[in-house]
Amino acid sequence: MDRFEAVDAPTVGGWPKPVARANPHELLSCVTALATFGDALEGLGVDPAEVCGYVLGWSLAYEAGASWQYGVGPEVLHSPVDVDRLDYMVRDDHMTGADVLNVDTGRMIAAYTAHPDAGLALSEQALSAVGNYLEGRVSLYQWVTQHHKSVYANVLLQRLLDELERARAAPLVTADAVLDEGIDDYWLFERFREAAADPPSEAFRDLYRRFRSRDFAESCWKHRLGYGDVIAADAAEQGAYSRWLVGNDTRLERLLAERFGLPEHEVWIERSYVPEYEPAELRDIPLAHNGRTQSVAEHGLYGGREFERAIPFVYVPEGYTDAAVDALNERFSAEHGGAGAGDGN
């Protein structure tokens, strides 16, 4: 905190902007760098706080007045074409078997260059790869990250964790546990397995069975086209319908559970757990040529592609999807698209 204040970093809600806008795993990486590797980094002549700044997309040295080159370093980890994205895109495509990606990551990285005004940029060597990168990123997001089964699996794990923590009356995964015990996915799955021997609740028993057998609930729609086909809203009102579902999720889950005589833990209304891609962000990729830069959009590589927006999903037991859609449409129409409805939670 002090180091960010020393360079007059802007604040959001009383916190330095890089900290306030960071994801939890980024903050945990900073804590790990300071608590576990701080002495080792200092022994190498590296400022641990600068490492944290890089993780959060900032260079404290640059903000303190160092040359522009210092500002390029963080962009290797935090930019529309950073190495983290290139890594997880290829890894997710391979591990899921999606096969929707055709990106020459070697060419992209070899094309990294730096510019005093634009910072991290791509040289003309990447022209043949940038278009594939943009299209591949959208496809991977649409057909893997936001796939209805991916969303369900993520929430299923979170619900299992919630049930177990409720029984323990204490959080199971904490920053201290990660640092002191080195907990990971396998550690968490073992805690689930142990708890299943004497389930803390009926909900945990059923959710763990689903997790172990991959017996996922039915989604009332599987993609945006299906969503538009069944909801009681035209294209212009789909956003309002989505906001109504997400803003009243608990109330609507209870409504469906009561109507069909189902346990509440078998009816979920969930939105994708990742933020939407922002077209403006993907357009903000500088290309360097002959000492000047222009954006991907200016060069014409981006085109007019519209990016898919996240949609909510409604999960119910097999055989209830049509009835659930009818019930939701009936309620939505009665509430005039959710106008004036509270969060219902």
Image (cartoon, grey):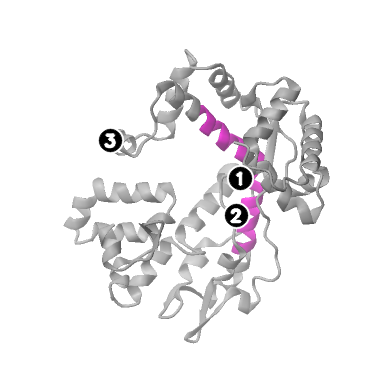
Q: Residues within 10 Å of mark 1 (few under 14, many from 20)?
A: many
Query: Residue 96 in magenta?
Result: no
Q: Is residue 115 above or below residue 1?
A: below
Outermost residue to the top: 198
Q: Residues within 10 Å of mark 2 (few under 14, many from 20)?
A: some
Residue 256 left/right relative to 167: right
**Which kind of residue does numbered mark 3 sit on?**
Asp
Query: On the image, numbered disc 2 is attached to which residue?
Result: 276
Residue sitting nearer the eye, 89 or 167:
167
Q: Quadrant of residue 273?
A: top right
Residue sitting nearer the eye, 170 or 251:
251
Q: CA distance from mark 3 to mark 1?
A: 31 Å
Can you give x and y, in whole percent of width and height, for residue 146 in the image? 63, 46
Q: CA distance from mark 3 to mark 2?
A: 34 Å
Mark sitting on residue 103: none
Can you give x and y, in whole percent of width and height, for residue 97 in the image? 62, 44
Q: Quadrant of the N terminus?
A: bottom left
Tags 3 and 1 touching, CB below 8 Å: no
Q: Residues within 10 Å of mark 3 (few under 14, many from 20)?
A: few
Query: On the image, numbered disc 3 is attached to which residue?
Result: 180
Residue 134 left/right relative to 201: right
Q: Quadrant of residue 296?
A: bottom right
Tags 2 and 1 touching, CB below 8 Å: yes
Mark 3 or mark 2: which is in front? 2
Q: CA distance from mark 2 to mark 1?
A: 9 Å
Residue stretch in magenta: 133-160
SS for callout 1: loop
Can you give x and y, in whole percent of width and height, for residue 68 in the image? 35, 77
